[in-house]
Amino acid sequence: MNLDKYRVVARRWWRQEIRPLFILALILFSVRSSLADWNDVPTGSMKPTILEGDRIFVNKVAYDLKMPFTTWHLAEWGNPQRGDVVVFYSPKDGQRLVKRVIGLPGDTVELRNDQLIINGQPVDYAPADPGMAAQLSGIERERGVFSTEELPGSPHAVMAINGVSAMRTFGPVQVPPGRYFMMGDNRDNSFDSRYFGTVARGQILGRATSVVLSINKENHWLPRWGRTFTSLEHTTR
């Protein structure tokens, strides 16, 4: 009798307590896997656009719909565009990275002394917004060289760092079909396609659209409220 009683209680506990939580967790993780997610940014390779401690929103249906928990594409309705900030799996070690799309399939990408050249056309550079580097450290503001890179359709801030060894000259290389050339906005401190090569379309998880929360790890983990819900997309998209 006691064993039967325990079985009845266990079944009731499963139906009323465990199963609903299990279903809810499955739904939530499926949504994060296929529709939308957030990504913590641990490095400064996208400064000054994205800072260490930013948590960015990733639109996983920006380009396609994937099978939950896989990279299998169920449907595609678009492709990354030049200037998009995307999250992808690194072809080097499979880690999730956040970079900017610089070269599209068929493009020829070249870098000469930190000046970007796409399809033989040098990209223009303009003075940066003076307040753009306000949230960087004093050393970064002192040693950093900031400008606005007039990438067609997506002008954005970039920085270089005086006094560090970096790959400031690269290429030219042609981007193969179905692949993309990625670079960080912090050009002298970014491990990107200059080092690990182009990224396959199937390895791109989605487009990063905004900062939803930012934590300053150098200042007692306090929030940077001014960065909350700031867009990563230029208005000319």
Image (cartoon, rainbow, N blue to C red):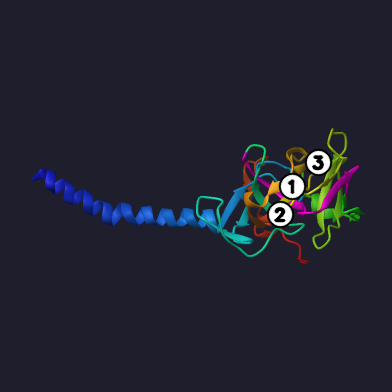
Q: Residue at x 63, y 61 (%)?
A: 62
Q: Residue at x 22, y 52 (%)?
A: 11
Range of magenta residues? 94-116
Q: Residues within 10 Å of mark 1 (few under 14, many from 20)?
A: many
Q: Is residue 136 magenta?
A: no
Cα–Cα gap, marks 2 and 1: 9 Å
Query: Type of residue at label 1?
Result: Met
Indicate which disc, 2 or 3, sits on the residue closer to the N terminus: 2
Q: Magenta stretch: dominant SS?
A: strand
Between circles 2 and 1, the one closer to the viewer is 2
Q: Nearer the viewer, mark 2 or mark 3?
A: 2
| In this rendering, position of residue 150 left or right of residue 76 | right
The image quadrant of residue 235 is: bottom right
Q: Amino acid at mark 2?
A: Val
Q: Which residue is mark 2?
A: 85
Mark nearest the camera among 3 and 1 is: 1
Determine the secondary structure under disc 3.
helix
**Residue 31, percent from left and from top:** 50, 58
> Which residue is at a point 69% across and 56% down the rendered structure image?
226
Q: Earlier in the sequence, mark 2 or mark 1?
A: 1
User: Are circles 2 and 1 on residues that touch, CB within 8 Å?
Assistant: yes
Residue 228, image x and y in percent? 65, 57
Q: Nearer the viewer, residue 92 or 86?
A: 92
Compared across the picture, whether 71 is left or right of 165 comes to left
